[in-house]
Amino acid sequence: MKFYDCATAPSPRRVRMFIAEKNLDIPVVEVDLGSLEQHSQAFATLNPHRTVPVLELDDGSILTSSHAICRYLEEVYPQQPLMGRNPEERGHIADLEWRIEQEGFMAVGESFRNRARSFKNNAVTGKHEHAQIPELVERGRVRASQFMQWLDNHLAEREFIAGDYFSVADITAFITLDFAKWIKLEAPKECKNLHRWFSEVAKRPSASL
Ligand SMILES: N[C@@H](CCC(=O)N[C@@H](CS)C(=O)NCC(=O)O)C(=O)O
């Protein structure tokens, strides 16, 4: 197995945290998005979607999205489960992660990619050019703020996002809040539950990766 990572990007970080929480040792290949290595012939041949993370399996096939990679690793290494211990937990965690990804991560990404000059004609990942839409910069920020308010309320009655145990939903939300700093967005001080939860997750060794 080989994990194609990028130390500076949020989606691979999600997988990095997941791998660390499970104490797995998977060989890493660093991909330099800064020098646009994702568009090199070698990388585009491996992953035509031109994104990281990628997990290359021992049979040579690849997985190209963080959710699928985590799902696969959870199946192969069921110890220290992060995606639920029974069908109910698995269902709730999948539901929560979908919301965090759609309403948090995608909102931040939309705001970031439609503003940063380096993405002028690449507002969407991949080989096709897409112009930025300036209106999405503010809309993404508003959506991300609304997401933070929702998460703060959600955490009022829970230690972690899925309940009293750490799960992949915490990983996805944690990297989303750090990603939000790229658009200079932080949770308001009044979001006390969110701050309490964030500093708890930040203490985990996996959070420093
Ligand atoms: N849904 C995918 C998103 C992957 C993705 O967009 N990765 C970004 C880094 S966070 C990337 O590779 N970007 C390449 C580019 O901007 O050209 C996942 O969660 O793995």
Image (spheres, rainbow, N blue to C red):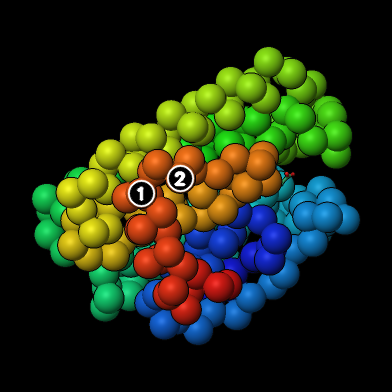
Q: Secondary structure at mark 1?
A: helix
Q: Report the residue at 79% width, 21% height from top.
A: 131
- Up the image or down, 60 lies above or below 157; here it is below
Residue 68 in percent (x, y) is at: 43, 53
Residue 186 in percent (x, y) is at: 55, 44
Residue 31 in percent (x, y) is at: 75, 63
Residue 83 in percent (x, y) is at: 28, 59
| Amino acid type shown at disc 1 | Lys
Identify the disc placed on residue 40.
none
Q: Describe residue 85's horizontal placement relative to residue 103 as left or right.
A: left
Are there few (<14), some (14-19), or many (20+) residues within 10 Å of tag 1? some
Mark 2 CB lies closer than 8 A to ligand 1:
no
- Up the image or down, 23 lies above or below 72; here it is below
**Residue under pointer 1:** 192
Residue 115 location, quadrant: top right
Q: Report the residue at 33% width, 42% height from top.
A: 152
Asked whether 26 or 186 is in front, the reply is 186
Q: Describe residue 34's horizontal placement relative to residue 50 as left or right.
A: right
Q: Secondary structure at mark 2?
A: loop
Are dots 2 and 1 in contact, CB under 8 Å?
Answer: yes
Residue 101 location, quadrant: top left
| Amino acid type shown at disc 2 | Lys
Q: Is residue 95 visible?
A: no
Q: Is residue 138 visible?
A: yes
Are there few (<14), some (14-19), or many (20+) residues within 10 Å of tag 2? few
**Residue under pointer 2:** 189
Q: Quadrant of the C terminus?
A: bottom right
